């Protein structure tokens, strides 16, 4: 029974690790989604800016206005590139956290299985002892009855 208690304590530790891994994974997913949303918004701004640029080219707009629009599009491109790097890092972090979560989940399952096997073994051993005890009591009763 002491062995099972030890494994139960270890299981509690592994479950805490699993909970921590779940929390870290959720945070990394939120970070990834946040960066992805920023990129999406910038891409929409860039698309709008490019449409404005195209419409400026169709009209008689001062050259300075067209240059400003091109510069704005270039700034958006640079910000998008920077965010893409951040998104890659966030995705990598999220994947690492997911691997840790999977590993923690497997560890918890291992300990649950070990505990289950130990409990079944202890139960079988106790049943065997009970049967031996009952056999011993029956033999004593038989001898005491026979000796009368």
Image (tube, helix red, strand yellow):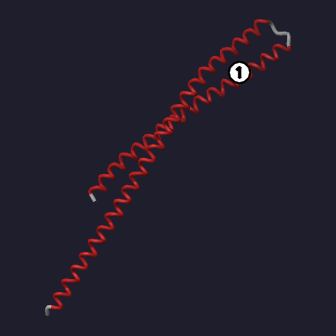
Q: Quadrant of the C terminus?
A: bottom left
Specify whether 130 is left or right of 113. Answer: left
Q: Position of residue 12 (x, y in %)?
A: 36, 49
Say which quarter of the image contains residue 19: top left
Q: Is residue 8 placed above or below 49 in the rendered structure? A: below
Which x, y percent locates residue 138? 23, 83
The residue singled out by tag 1 in the image is 46
User: Does 127 appear above or below 19?
Assistant: below
Query: Is residue 99 or residue 132 the one in the foreground?
Result: 132
Asked if 28 appears above or below 79 in the picture, the reply is below
> As drawn, is 51 to the left or to the right of 117?
right
Q: Farthest residue in the left direction? A: 148
Using the image, determine if residue 45 lies above or below residue 102.
Answer: above
Q: Quadrant of residue 81?
A: top right
Task: Give the residue displayed 85% in from the left and 13% down from the top.
Answer: 59
Q: Residue at x 58, y 31 (%)?
A: 34
Q: Position of residue 88 (x, y in %)?
A: 57, 28
Identify the residue at horizontal 73%, vertical 12% (top origin). Answer: 70
Quadrant assignment for the N terminus: bottom left
Tally of marks: 1
Answer with the quarter of the image where residue 113 lies: bottom left
Circle 1 Cα neighbour tier, 10 Å, few/some/many (<14 / 14–19 / ≥20): some
Say which element carries label 1.
helix
As rendered, which of 143 and 89 lies closer to the eye? 143
Decide which of 54, 138 is in the foreground and name it.
138
Q: Percent position (x, y) of residue 27?
A: 50, 35
């Amino acid at each position: 029974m002491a062995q099972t208690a030890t494994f139960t304590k270890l299981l509690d530790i592994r479950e805490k690790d699993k909970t921590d891994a779940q929390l870290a994974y959720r945070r990394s997913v939120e970070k990834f989604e946040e960066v992805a949303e920023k990129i999406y918004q910038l891409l929409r701004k860039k698309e709008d800016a490019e449409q404005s640029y195209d419409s400026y080219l169709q009209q008689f707009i001062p050259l300075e206005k067209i240059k400003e629009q091109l510069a704005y599009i270039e700034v958006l491109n640079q910000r998008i590139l920077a965010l893409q790097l951040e998104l890659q890092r966030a995705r990598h972090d999220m994947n690492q956290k997911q691997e840790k979560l999977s590993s923690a989940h497997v560890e918890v399952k291992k300990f649950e299985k070990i505990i289950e096997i130990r409990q079944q073994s202890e139960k079988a051993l106790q049943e065997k002892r009970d049967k031996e005890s009952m056999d011993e009591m029956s033999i004593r009763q038989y001898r005491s009855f026979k000796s009368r």
